[in-house]
Amino acid sequence: MVEDLNVPLVAAGDEETEGDLDSLGTLRRGLRSTSYRRAVVSGVDFDSSTNFKKKNRMSQPLLKAVVEDKEKFSSLGRIKKKMLKGQGTFDGEENAVLYQNYKEKALDIDSDEDSEPKEQKTDEKIVVQYKPLRSTWSQLSVVKRNGLSQTISQEERKRQEAIFEVISSEHSYLLSLEILIRMFKNSKELSFTMTKTESHHLFSNISDVCEASKKFFKELEMRHQNNIFIDDISDIVEKHTTSTFDPYVKYCTNEVYQQRTLQKLLATNPTFKEVLSRIESHEDCRNLPMISFLILPMQRVTRLPLLMDTICQKTPKDSPKYEDCKRALKEVSKLVRLCNEGARKMERTEMMYTINSQLEFKIKPFPLVSSSRWLVKRGELTAYVEDTGLFSKRTSKQQVYFFLFNDVLIITKKKSEESYSVTAYSLRDQLLVEQCDNEELNSSPVKTSSTMLYSRQNSASHLFRLTILSNHAGEKMEMLLGTESQSERARWITTLGQNSDRQSTDRTTLTQVEIIRTYTAKQSDELSLQVADVVLVYQKVNDGWYEGERLRDGERGWFPMECAKEITCQATIDKNMERMGRLLGIETNV
């Protein structure tokens, strides 16, 4: 509720309509990534001189405040205003901050609306310099002139800021989409460098996504124009999530084709690469690479639940608006799951067919391709094998290559990068795994030979034992395996052991970390992370790796410690657990 004041508010006349700007510093920050791992790993050149010029300083957004009617307000809760003809809430689009450089306050776990932006460690490869202006509800001149932020409680002001951030960030996002379509998709020069199929894979249904954003923003802006004091937007979010945002699922599902097509064009089509670089260097693109525009729909859809959760957090729990907000949050979370599942299913299917074509079965073939099967981890290991000779025994070393799927382990010998000879396989529920010390090599019946072998080799010294209760031939197998690092051993033990005890882990006892640098997964068991993501840590390995669970969607995986900093404030930790409960619908004991 809006609090009553003794001091009446009088609407201003035709005063300046531009928001006041505070003094701003320069902030270097990394572009947030989503799951475009193959584009990054396989050589999309973000660091090209054509992509980033020295004069890469973003223009500042010029937000036009709504011009009010000159009548007095009937009440503080119903502050009406009349728009100038043709004027919207956000004018001056040519100067607005693009979504790549928009930092949502809702993503800052220690956010306080009055605090200054903090400098964050950046991704070394992707650096964009800009002045970190965030247009907030309190900064609007209509709010300042009438002192509205001082007439309401602090909590209600924070709720207004959270609501307005959904609107202003959607505006920024929409501008970026329009640049993607106008400068890249509709470029005849660029289209002439590729086939229609390649163009379709590259841009998919981005026009439909843009139209969905336009409809969403139009209704949000109309709500804001009708009343500067925004009662709620949950109904608008719920409506468009359930009826307008279907194009997002299709776009995200196409991601695997999009990234593969872009890789191929950059690697094999010099004309495409040249034209693309020229377009990227155009002032309208702000020297940003096309890939930063292409990944925006996935970024936007994953941030919407966090934005809505912030509104939920700022809304009194005994208010009817709280239940409305929870309903909207549930719908946007469902949309994110559909997008993730679509992208993941397509990627897994592609991977499955590729691996199946590379396997050569010297034993009874296994029908690998299945819609319910996916790759969990793959990689080379050292196997220590005891050989029995005519007069003595000795331990020898062999290289094996594992393909671990969600339900089966395929053991192979690597012949080349695209060819593997299958020597054994087993269902995953037949596997037992345990860590063992390096001294186990010395406890072998053939102590002398094994000790000599171990002393001659430094690699693969981190050991674990794998027992296969029943392999493809119904036989029991025991393997002593070694990796080159502690973290790699921990990762294999974790994935082979399936970690069924994880479900009973009390999340409130886990260490929480905040991501300070973007990380893109390079292996199947790794976790792609965006700046400001929060992760619950299940394992910490001394050579610099965490295994954790991403708070916003419950995804698990490994990531480097250097990308994160530990969260020590107990109030923030409790708040994060409450947020996780709202986002995932789980019990968090807070």
Image (cartoon, rainbow, N blue to C red):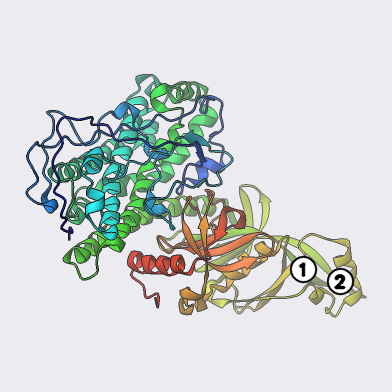
Element type where label 1 sits in the image: strand
Which residue corresponds to the image point at 23% horizontal and 29% vertical from the top-left? Answer: 16
Compared across the picture, whether 65 is left or right of 203 comes to left
**Image quarter hosting the C terminus:** bottom left
The local crowd at label 1, few if under 14, some if 14 to 19, many if 20 or more residues have their Cα within 10 Å, is many
Looking at the picture, tell me which residue is in the foreground, 318 or 340: 318
Q: How many marks?
A: 2
Q: List x then y, in percent, for residue 218.
A: 18, 40
Q: CA distance from mark 1 to mark 2?
A: 9 Å
**Which amino acid type corresponds to the residue marked 1 in the rendered image?**
Tyr
Of callouts 1 and 2, which one flags the residue occurring earlier in the amino acid sequence?
A: 1
Q: List x then y, in percent, for residue 533.
A: 46, 56
Q: List x then y, in percent, for residue 354.
A: 51, 50
Looking at the picture, tell me which residue is in the foreground, 348 or 539: 539
**Which amino acid type corresponds to the residue marked 2 in the rendered image?**
Ser
Residue under numbered circle 2: 450
Element type where label 2 sits in the image: helix
**Image quarter hosting the N terminus:** bottom left
Which residue corresponds to the image point at 54% horizontal and 25% vertical from the top-left? Answer: 54
Q: List x then y, in percent, for residue 157.
A: 27, 54
Looking at the picture, tell me which residue is in the foreground, 32 or 74: 74
> Farthest residue toward the front?
6
Q: Are marks 1 and 2 in contact (CB under 8 Å)?
A: yes
Residue under numbered circle 1: 384
